[in-house]
Image: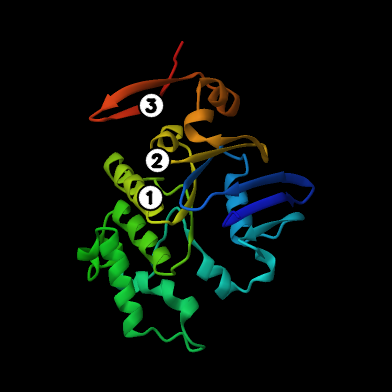
Amino acid sequence: MYPLKVENLSFAWGAKMTIDDVTFGIEAGTVTSILGPNGSGKTTLLKLMLGFLSPVSGRVMLGEHDLATLDLAMRAKKMAYVPQRHTAVFSYRVLDIVVLGRIPYSNVFCKITDNDYQLASECLNQLGIGHLAERSYTEISGGEQQLVLIARALVQQAEILIMDEPVSGLDYGNQLMLLKQLRRLAQNGITCVKTTHYPEHALWTSDRAIFVRAGKIIATGNSADIINSSTLKDLYNADIRILESEAGSQKMRTCVPVFD
């Protein structure tokens, strides 16, 4: 059984069908990248998977449960969301940002306990950013902020992590730092789903890839199998070569544009 499955999902803005009869399953403990050009429906698809939007037909399954039948607290215990960017209105401590992920487990008065703070500290340490706990969230780097948001998602103790372009706006070093953490999370059993504009990132860190164009899935499978010059040409209408090189003990594949 897939921990997350989309079945015959469709969605429309007015008369325009933006997601059209989409079906796929996400395997447990893997990283899956959703790729597609701007306006292809990637973010809409994520919002449907999270329950932020309601489909006109089809359904999203969390294990054996239809997402539509679960209340918000139960959804949050099963699935966590990391947005592209988060701007805090006030200068909260990093630890206080992370502990907000415990709200689904709190009582009716949303009281946060000492145990919740302990879990938040453990999640920060798990991501290697425990030293930021007392720092102001607004004063740390963009890459560090993204890791803090991942820590907030982890403290929900959800088995599925969904991210919308998590490396957007980050410098190269912070992109690599975040991608490495995603691989570690998957190795620890967390199921990760992300949208991305970088096919090489999918080659480096993702087990599976899903290509979306005009609201339809045009390819899905193992990243190493379906990300190639032909499929990228079909997806982006661009000439791209896949080059292979050695990086230490690893063989890495990189996407290189072809300019006439």
Quadrant of the image occupied by residue 173: top left
**Residue at 55% in and 75% down:** 73
- Residue 89 vs residue 36, the one in the foreground: 36
Q: How far is mark 1 from mark 3, CA to CA?
A: 19 Å
Q: How far is mark 2 from mark 3, CA to CA?
A: 12 Å
Along the horizontal axis of the image, is 232 left or right of 114? right
- Above or below residue 90? Residue 218 is above
Outermost front residue: 1
Percent position of residue 61, x then y: 65, 59
Residue 182 is marked as: 1
Q: How far is mark 2 from mark 1, CA to CA?
A: 8 Å
Outermost top residue: 260
**Residue at 31% in and 42% down:** 176
Q: Are marks 2 and 1 in contact (CB under 8 Å)?
A: yes
Disc 3: which residue:
254
Disc 2: which residue:
205
Type of amino acid at the residue the image marks with label 2: Thr
**Residue at 67% in and 37% down:** 214
- Above or below residue 43? Residue 136 is below
- Above or below residue 166? Residue 227 is above
Type of amino acid at the residue the image marks with label 1: Leu
Q: Nearer the viewer, mark 2 or mark 3?
A: 2
N-terminal-most mark, 2 or 1? 1
